[in-house]
Image (cartoon, rainbow, N blue to C red):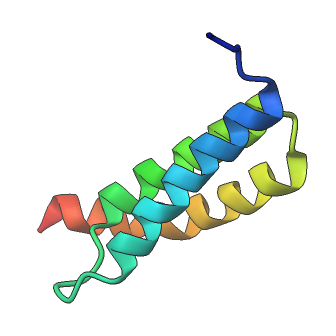
Amino acid sequence: MSQSLGTADFFTLEAGECLNRLEALLARPEGVSGEEFVRQVRLLRGAALMANLQPVAQAGAAFEALAVPAALIDQAV
């Protein structure tokens, strides 16, 4: 039996996956890839926007603003 996911269910699944990947990134002994961190934060922010969860989207935007300069440094090295 197939059931369609509601917006909140979709957000829960997507956010859970993003947070798991972020946790794994932060646990890497070699450090965090800024580019990958930005990618995961953008996914989280996008899922929050789709679910109309503005506080989560705003938090994601703040993390993204902090991470983008690090990702640009990663690309330059």
The relative height of residue 47 versus residue 66 in the rendered view (above or below) is above
Image x and y of residue 70, in percent: 37, 70
> What residue is at 59 percent from the left and 54 percent from the top?
16
In the image, residue 59 lies at what x, y percent? 75, 62
Rendered image quadrant of residue 73: bottom left
Residue 77 position by quadrant:
bottom left
Viewer-nearest residue: 45 or 7: 7
Asked whether, in this view, residue 38 is left or right of residue 31, the answer is: right
Query: Residue 41's spot in the image, x, y percent?
Result: 54, 55
Looking at the picture, does residue 25 appear above or below residue 42? below
**Position in image of residue 72 (x %, y %):** 31, 60
Q: Is residue 51 above or below residue 5?
A: below
Tally of marks: 0
Towards the viewer: 73 or 22:
22
Quadrant location, the N terminus? top right
**Which residue is at the far front?**
1
Identify which residue is drawn at 38% across, 79% down: 26
The residue lying at 72 percent from left, 22 percent from top is: 5
Q: Residue at x 54, y 42 (%)?
A: 43
Q: Describe residue 19's horizontal placement relative to residue 35 as left or right.
A: right
Seen as rendered, the residue at the extreme top is: 1
